[in-house]
Image (tube, coloured by chain):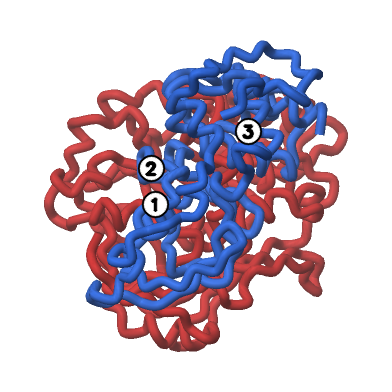
Amino acid sequence: MHAFAFVRPADTAAAVASAAQANTAQQGADVRFVAGGTTLLDLMKLNVETPARVIDINRLPLNQIEVTPDGGLKIGATVRNTDLAHHPTVQRDYAVLSQALLAGASAQLRNMATTAGNLLQRTRCVYFRDTAMPCNKRDPGTGCPAITGTNRTLAVLGTSAHCIATHPSDMCVAMVALEATIHVQGPQGTRAIPVGDFHLLPGSTPHRETVLEPGDLITHVTLPPPVVGSRQVYLKLRDRASYEFALASAAVVLTVAGGHVTRVRVALGGVGTKPWRSPEAEAALVGQPTNQAHFRTAAEAALRDAQPQSENAFKIELATRCLTHALQLATA
Amino acid sequence: MRDDPQSGQSNLTCQALLRTTGGSAAAAVMAGDSTSREGAAPAAIADGANIAGAVPITLRVNGTDRPLRVDPRTTLLDCLRETLALTGTKKGCDHGQCGACTVHVNGRRVNSCLTLAVMHAGDEITTIEGLGTPDALHPMQAAFLACDGYQCGYCTSGQIMSAVALLTEHCGPDDTAVKELMSGNICRCGAYANIVAAIQHVRKHP
């Protein structure tokens, strides 16, 4: 691990100021905030992350969960995954988020990992994690050996000729289905970013994963008021029963009246280069009866643009069945 | 080491197979011989004053304040093992994938390999050495002995630290729920069935 200066700022403004001179907030950043450390320390040991300054935000007052005046929920940046998953309001009104969090990682990691950190979780692509290998995401311009190499777990949606790395988060998939908003404090002040706009497609710049700029600190995430009467399901399929990343997952927030879908939000995990909202599936579902045939049609619509690689074509059918079954569970 | 690990454990449903002659696995379960419990470390190791960039911190480990100087890169795991000589906590993968390094921070279990020592000034850290003593085992340690919840013993301290934390977590009553919450602790020997039995024994006979 490279040497770094460890900084513990007195307040949020000091944290932002300490990071404001960073060269980037993306891959190659010379300044990093640390909260749980579960991604950052892992990648620093691999020399994938080599910050010269690490800013500890754990003592900042960013660990609260509060109901907002509009009836939504405000989740602090350093709220641990365990605490968010078991919060009574989350379990009652945002069940898909609780389910997604508890489907991720291990109990120890959930005790460490935070809301903001999970938004910035990095891909598990083996080439990204191995500094002996080329990788456009880690080292721009060096190429993507995954496209002709080991790609069984990699993405089929949102890929480019430069990168096919899967976004690994479960939490983010639920956040997308819940239409969360990410709140950032930066050198120019505060701003709010819809979660759907927060993560970037790889395109020709896969080292740019989010819209964050130097000094930007995620302070909290807000959820809109709960959708009255909605049924929520997070279904995760993986190589083993627990403690594994998704091969495919689906988050569904669905409202039914008179046997027909009146409102639905669909997001997929394990198959996209970012947490994957599917307006195609949503459009195919709204107004339709809640039966398997329509669910299957909607799921196929979600995967219509999928681009398989040499080892991961199975994910297209797997994700289709995953979403179909999640919709069945939500309407059972 | 006690000759009869089942004393006071008459309700155990699983068979105790402890080798009374002892062994590394049993020693790991017993966790704290007097040397490691004291955490005596050579002064030259504990005092990192000569390390460039070392910073002063005080870690509170097993109820004792330990003033230290550490390189900011030092993980909590390496600090416990190399600086404080508390070698009951094991290094397995060093990437948060195996659970061998599990300790408690403020009563919650964490992977000590994925957090920095300098992040834990003021926190209450508990390692396997702080759980019980050879003469007064924590009930979970006694249950692991009685149920033979290990073979080589390398993962055992992490398994026990996770198991003790699980007792205070949201966990359903059945074995499936226990397995789910213990999935962050890998046992290469495959002692899982006996580990689950040990945990369930403690849950049913608190």
The answer to whether residue B162 is above or below residue A76 is above
Q: CA distance from mark 1 to mark 2?
A: 9 Å
Q: Residues within 10 Å of mark 1 (few under 14, many from 20)?
A: some
The answer to whether residue A282 is seen in the rendering is no
Residue at 43% from the left image edge and 23% from the top image edge:
B152
Residue A278 coordinates in the image, percent (x, y): 54, 43
Q: Which element type, helix, strand or loop, lies under badge 2? A: loop
Which is nearer the eye, B59 or B34? Answer: B34
Q: Which element type, helix, strand or loop, lies under badge 3? A: helix
Residue at 50% from the left image edge and 73% from the top image edge:
A57
For the residues bearing labels 2 and 3, Cβ distance under 8 angstroms:
no
Residue, disc 1: B81
Q: CA distance from mark 3 to mark 1?
A: 20 Å
Q: Residues within 10 Å of mark 2 (few under 14, many from 20)?
A: many
The residue mark sitting in front, 2 or 3, is: 3
For the residues bearing labels 1 and 2, Cβ distance under 8 angstroms:
yes
Toward the right, the furthest residue is A258
Residue, disc 3: B141
Residue, disc 2: B91
The quadrant of the rendering that contains the N terminus of chain A is bottom left
Q: Callout 3, which amino acid?
A: Gln
Q: Are marks 3 and 1 on the same chain?
A: yes
Q: Callout 1, which amino acid?
A: Arg
Q: Pick whichever of labels 3 and 1 is earlier in the sequence.
A: 1
Q: Is residue A272 left or right of residue A45?
A: right
| Quarter assignment of residue A41 | bottom left
Q: Which element type, helix, strand or loop, lies under badge 1? A: helix
Give me the chain that's blue: B
Residue B65 coordinates in the image, percent (x, y): 55, 69
Residue A266 coordinates in the image, percent (x, y): 61, 42
Which is nearer the eye, A88 or A271? Answer: A88
Q: CA distance from mark 2 to mark 3?
A: 20 Å
